[in-house]
Amino acid sequence: METARLIEAQDVEVDAHGEIKLLSGVAKERRISIEDEEMRHGRKSKSQRFDGYKRHILRDLDNGLVRAVGVTRANVPEASVTDAIATDLKYQKVNLVELHIDRAYLSSSLVQNRDDQLTIYCKAWQVKNGKRFTKTAFILDWDNQTICCPNQVTVPFSVGGKVQFPKNICATCPFRERCTTSKTGRSVSIHPDEPLFRELQQRQLSLVGRAKLRERVAVEHSLSHIGRWQGDQARYVGSRKNLFDLRRTAVVHNLHVLAKIFTHTTEQSATSS
C-alpha cells in the first residue's frame, strides 16, 4: 500500500475543492516501477528518453579486456559511477596511464583527483560566441595568473572566477566589433577545470591528438557487444543484481577476447615454426 500511495502522490494531487488532478511536470526522483524501487527515468537528450539503469564499462585499450563495470540509476550523472570503478581497479592493482572518456565523465573523481601521470583524452567542449572572439582567443598565463586579450591588454584572473576587462579600454579597442557589444567591456569566465579544457582543445588541433581520440571507438564496440549479449531490459530487480548480471556478461566478453588472443598467438607460432 505504501508503494501505491507513493506512486499516486507523485502523479496526482487534490485541490482545495477536493478534486483529484494530474500534476504538471515530473516529480523529482519519480518511481517508475512497482517491483523495482531503484529504476528511474533517464535522458540521452531532450528528445530521447530511456527508463531503468545505465551500464558503464572500463575497457583496457591495450588488450581489449573489460577491467571494470558499473550500474547506476538512469537519472544520475555518469560521473557518479567512477568511485565504484576506481575501487575495482584498486583490487586489481591497476594504475591508469591514459583515460579515454566521454565528456559526461569529466566531472568524475578519476579526473578531478588525477595525478600528473594520468593523461585525459576526451573530446573538448565546443566554444561558441557567434561571430565574435571566443574564449580561446585569449591567452592564459597560469604561472602569473593573468589573461591577455587579442589587443594585448593583460588583467589578472582567478580560477573559477570572472574576468572583467576595463570598459574604457574596450570602448576604444580596434577589435571591439569582433569582441563584444557590452557597454561595460568584455568579460571572460574562467572555469575551475579551465586548464584541462585548454589541454583538450589543444590536443584536438593536431593529427596525433585526433588519432588518440579515435581510440575510444573501441570502448563503444565493447559496449555494443555487451549490450547485444545482455539485452536492453534489466533482468533483475535492483541495481545490485543487475550489476552482477553486467559483470557476468563482461566475463563472457573477456573470454571471447582471450580466445582471439590465443588463436592469434597460436597462428603466429605456427607460422614462425
Image (cartoon, rainbow, N blue to C red):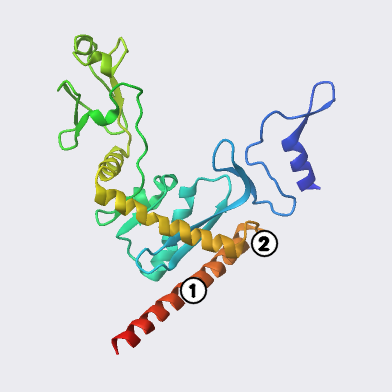
User: Where's residue 202, x and y in %?
Assistant: 25, 42
Look at the numbered disc 1 and give the secondary structure of its residue: helix
Find disc 1 in the rendering and name its residue: 256
Image height of 266 relative to 139, above or below:
below
What residue is at 84 percent from the left and 21 percent from the top? 17
Find disc 2 in the rendering and name its residue: 235
- Name which of mark 2 and mark 1 comes first in the sequence: 2
Examine the image and state in which quarter residue 87 appears. Answer: bottom left
User: Where's residue 135, x and y in %?
Assistant: 28, 29
- CA gap between label 2 and label 1 equals 22 Å
User: Where's residue 78, x and y in %?
Assistant: 49, 48
What residue is at 29 percent from the left and 56 percent from the top? 118
What residue is at 42 percent from the left and 80 percent from the top? 263
What residue is at 39 percent from the left and 55 percent from the top? 216
Identified by mark 2, the residue type is Arg
How many C-alpha atoms fall within 10 Å of the one at disc 2: few (<14), some, or many (≥20)? few
Examine the image and state in which quarter residue 12 appears. Answer: top right
Q: Residue furthest right?
A: 18
